[in-house]
Image (spheres, rainbow, N blue to C red):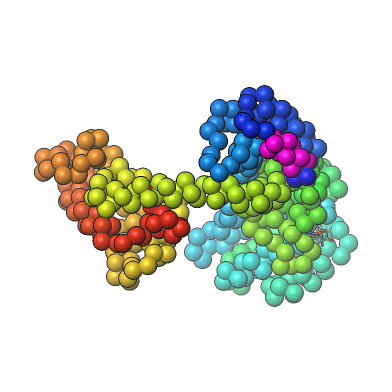
Amino acid sequence: LSEKLQNVFKNLRSKGRLTEADVKAALKEVKMALLEADVNFKVVKQFVKSVQERAIGADVMNGLNPGQMVIKIVNEEMIKMMGSETTELKLRPGQATTIIMMVGLQGAGKTTTTAKLAGKFKLKGKKPLLVACDVYRPAAIQQLQVNGEKQGVEVFTMGDGHKPVNIAKAAVEHAAKNGNNVVILDTAGRLHVDEDMMDELIEIKENVDVAQTVLVVDAMTGQDAVNVASTFDEKIGIDGVILTKLDGDTRGGAALSIRAVTGKPILYAGMGEKLSDLEQFYPERMASRILGMGDVLTLIEKAQAEMDDEKAAEMEKRFRKAEFTFNDYLDSMSQMKKMGGFANVLSMMPGIGGAQMKQIEDAMDEKKMARIEAIIYSMTPAERGDPNLINPSRKRRIAAGAGVDISEVNRLVKQFEQARKMMKQMPGMMGKGKRGGKFG
Ligand code: GDP
Ligand code: MG
């Protein structure tokens, strides 16, 4: 796909301005390239439509030419299509045991991935138990045992003389006695989706408390992988997908379409045969890989950073002049959330000590942030713009509106004044180039 797209954009790049005709012509090529990469037809249509809607009439950012601007939009829409954020495989909280059932066609990589996952969980301090439920494939049990041993995790087997559902039940009992808090069931696959396989999986699901059903699919099978995902989701219900053999897949069609078609996230990517070759799935990285345009993407990032810097500089000016208002406060709070929390941002800034840090961390915990937001939303625009307006009777009204005690409003206004003072005293912390100090 990447080579194809590169050519499309080369043509675009040589032109001056993006007209509607340009965008449409380029997207026709993008469409072809995606179809050739084995991306699902409906997904392609939707994708092209959303890029087109955004691209026509979009302002071309400073530092980018029109072609690069289209790439920026294609890239962003690709990331969106893959779910934007990295999704973690959800474990039950605390000491509760999480049962994970691995499903998929034969040869997809279930057994290998089971052992790979066990390694990840072990690193997280869990005590996994691998369960050999594939009683059909010759040597399947031994394969799991060998891999389990390599990872230093226990493997539960009962040979091939039992029904998978009974093996699963026995394994769960064993886990309870043995203190295993993650149980991974390695099930059998067939060459094609078939009723017996589905029935067997449903039977297991009905008899043990499976928390996560994880589908393993081979990325190299392209659109077939997507069809397999749809079928498994319809028949037994899946919680997420692991895409294997991405190391051998140059097209990216499966990665692009699975989320869009099934609505289920890609959790991990298999990147090789070694047991360490399992990576968290990052939509952003996948998109740049598919586009194969590292250099252009870096340029786009730079242009973006410059724009952010401009905004930050503007915000800094306002801080200094103590024009910082509750509107800015809301703004920076949503920015914080995006950046992984206030504390994280502040820890990157010079001159913030432990005591202040603790205070700030405390103030910024999520529940408190929600209450703060409620309070600010209960202020009138005038009050948000000029905190000095907020007299006692206004405070009472705001407290009632937000459903909080008046003391909380008092505290917020006071904290706000303090923050304003603190901002004013910190020299140049939001200046150009100091990305860590970016506030809004
Ligand atoms: P299962 O039938 O679903 O249990 O599949 P296996 O775990 O037995 O894997 C089938 C083959 O695919 C094995 O030869 C694995 O080494 C290989 N395999 C699994 N995952 C990956 C991967 O991410 N990359 C590559 N290159 N090979 C893989
Ligand atoms: Mg297997």
Residue toward you, 82 or 217: 82
Question: Which residue is at a point 58% across and 52% down the rendered structure image?
Answer: 86
Quadrant hosting residue 8: top right
Residue at the farthest left position: 392
**Part of the protein shown in magenta:** 4-14
Residue 107 position (above or below residue 252): below
Residue 78: say if magenta. Answer: no
Residue toward you, 400 or 19: 19
Residue at the farthest top position: 21
**Residue 66, x across and y down, in percent:** 62, 36
Residue 86 position (above or below residue 258): below
Question: Which residue is at a point 47% across and 46% down the rendered structure image?
Answer: 307
Quadrant hosting residue 260: top right
Q: Is residue 167 visible?
A: no
**Residue 17, x across and y down, in percent:** 62, 30
Q: Is residue 312 left or right of residue 324?
A: right
**Residue 345, x across and y down, in percent:** 41, 59
Magenta portion: prevailing SS class: helix
